[in-house]
Image (tube, rainbow, N blue to C red):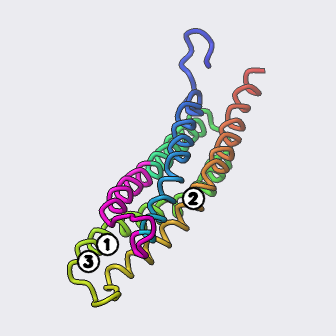
Amino acid sequence: MGNGSERPDASEGVRSTTMQAAILGMLVVNVPLLLVSFGMGYASRFDWMSVSVSAHLKVGLLAAFLTVLTQTTTMFYFMGTGSAIKSEVRERGLNPEFLARARAFKGSFFYLLTLGILLIMAAAMIGGGAHADLLWSGGEGGRTFYQILHEVLAILSLLVNMIAFALTPFYIRKNNRLLDDVGSTRAAAQE
């Protein structure tokens, strides 16, 4: 932190371990929930373990909600730290390379997070349609278009979100290194 009455610099405090812990905690809850929801979908389809479609629907909606919450919280955390780095570069006249580094890894990660959000939302919405479509099933053992589309979206959503979840700790570490590098310029300037 800044000395005495000095105003703290923009990047001080943004490396919030509380926020990082919250994101990682949401991941710990979200990963099994997403996997259980996915498994329940197949269990209800193939009539394994007496899992009902309504149980899958409830767990799936909860998993979709938590996935969107986790991904958006992660995005906002990185936006906040990026804004702090931008402020530091402007206020202290630091090397713009810090901004380029932040944009490089955050930009590529944000595409993955956004795609994960869009896929899980689509899977959940089409899943509701597939559930309603069960009333007009495609015949004996037949599957409707919505059921097939929901399954494809669920598979894609699971893959993309699991990749994003696996990469989140890596990008948090990378972000911390960048914040440390920005902070080290302050220590060097005070010497």
Gap between marks 1 and 2, in whole Å?
22 Å
Name the residue located 59 percent from the left edge and 31 percent from the top edge: 17
Residue at disc 2, secondary structure? helix
Indicate which disc residue 126 carries. 1
Query: What residue span does the magenta drawing correspond to?
Result: 44-69
Where is residue 155? Give x, y as percent: 49, 72
The secondary structure making up most of the magenta span is helix
Indicate which disc residue 164 carries. 2
Q: Residue furthest top?
A: 4
Residue at disc 1, secondary structure? helix
Where is residue 32? Give x, y as percent: 53, 53
Q: From the viewer's perspective, is residue 36 above or below residue 191?
A: below
Which residue is denoted by mark 3 in the rendering?
134
| Nearer to the camera, 16 or 9 | 16
Marks 3 & 2, CB-CB < 8 Å contact: no
Are there few (<14), some (14-19), or many (20+) residues within 10 Å of tag 3?
some
Image-based side of 112 in relation to 3, left or right: left
The amino acid type found where label 3 is placed reads: Leu
The amino acid type found where label 1 is placed reads: Ile
Residue 182 in magenta stretch: no
Where is residue 133? Give x, y as percent: 24, 78
**Could you say which quadrant of the image residue 165 lies in?**
bottom right
| Nearer to the camera, 25 or 15 | 25
Where is residue 152? Give x, y as percent: 45, 78
Marks 1 & 2, CB-CB < 8 Å contact: no
Q: From the viewer's perspective, is residue 165 above or below residue 122?
A: above
**How many marks on residues?**
3
Q: From the viewer's perspective, is residue 139 above or below residue 133?
A: below
Name the residue located 41 percent from the left edge and 64 percent from the top edge: 120
Q: From the viewer's perspective, is residue 9 above or below residue 94?
A: above
Image-based side of 81 in relation to 145, left or right: right
Are there few (<14), some (14-19), or many (20+) residues within 10 Å of tag 2?
many
